[in-house]
Amino acid sequence: MGARKALPAVPQYLQANYWWAYIHPRAVYVFERQWLVNLILWGNYRRLCNAVLNGFGRHLSGRALQIACAYGDLTPRLAACIAPGGTLEVVDILPIQIENLASKLAHDAPVKLHCMDSAALQFPDASFDRALLFFLLHEQPQAVRQKTLAEALRVIRPGGTLTIVDYAPPSRLNPLCYLWLPVLERLEPFARDLFSEKIAAWLPKGGGFATVSERRYFGGLYQMLTLRISGTVPDRKADA
């Protein structure tokens, strides 16, 4: 038998700030509950998942990439939309999250799982027709967030799309702007960035992609941004 491929090291920021949500053995037991995921998103989980599926057209041909596992039924629903001959590939840096996702998928689901760092994807350029970042960017410090976006764009073919669902700068009339942010600052210290900056602030400079659509939900608290790759994106490779 060949040597087992070494797993990527878990980043320090993830260990320090998210051990309770993703790494601890009890994390999956606590958070893998549909009602709880929906509650955390103030009742918007299914609405945002539906927005993703509708944006994809609910009939996914070719290769699709989900960057980071997600609690709830998003990935099984994505898998059910894969067209014959197509594949959904999911990457996550945590084996416990890969194992949890595998337990939610049908044994014959057209899904491939990879233990991989979102900031250093081990795929060739232009490998996928579309990619999805679902509530990942707010969990990453700025430097990692920039690399994740650069890597996501790198692995999408020209004409393909990158869909990003995450927090957004909410309307000042939204009371959660004042009530929810203090909670996130304590539990998710990098989330403030998404409340104060547009995602464009962390995208590679120089073009090579264009905004297809940008929608807001729940008083602007959440956003879905879709980018289309128009060609080679300059300087989009993550730094070594």
Image: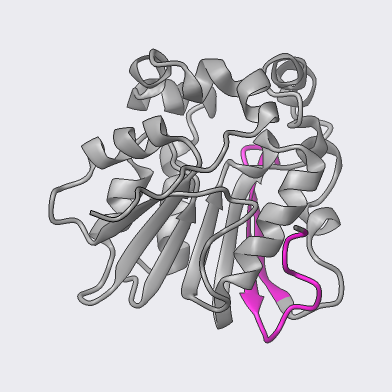
Residue 45 x %, y %: 46, 36
Considering only vertical position in the picture, is 63 above or below 101?
A: below
Residue 110, image x, y percentages: 23, 62
Front-most of residues 170 and 82: 82
Q: How many marks?
A: 0
At a point 76% along the width and 53% down the height, the residue shown is: 146
The answer to which quarter of the image holds residue 47 is top left
Identified at 60% across, 22% down, the residue is 18
Q: Which residues are magenta?
A: 210-239
In depth, the one of 72 and 64 nearer the eye is 64
Q: Quadrant of the N terminus?
A: bottom left
Residue at point 69%, 23% (across, down):
188
Q: Is residue 224 visible?
A: yes
Is 234 located above or below residue 198 in the figure?
below
Specify how the rendered protein is coloured: one colour
x%, y% of residue 44? 50, 35
Can see residue 170? Answer: no
Q: Is residue 88 left or right of residue 235?
A: left
Task: Judge from the rendering whether residue 57 lies leftward or rightward of residue 148; answer left or right.
Answer: left
State whether residue 183 is above or below residue 193.
above
Q: Quadrant of residue 190?
A: top right
Residue 34, x across and y down, in percent: 34, 27
Please say if 194 is above or below 43. below
Q: Is residue 235 one of those drawn in magenta?
A: yes
Q: Does 18 lie within the magenta span?
A: no
Camera-side residue of 197 and 28: 28
Report the side of 173 relative to 180 (left or right): right
Residue drawn at x 69%, y 58% as measured from the top left? 149
Q: Quadrant of the C terminus?
A: bottom right
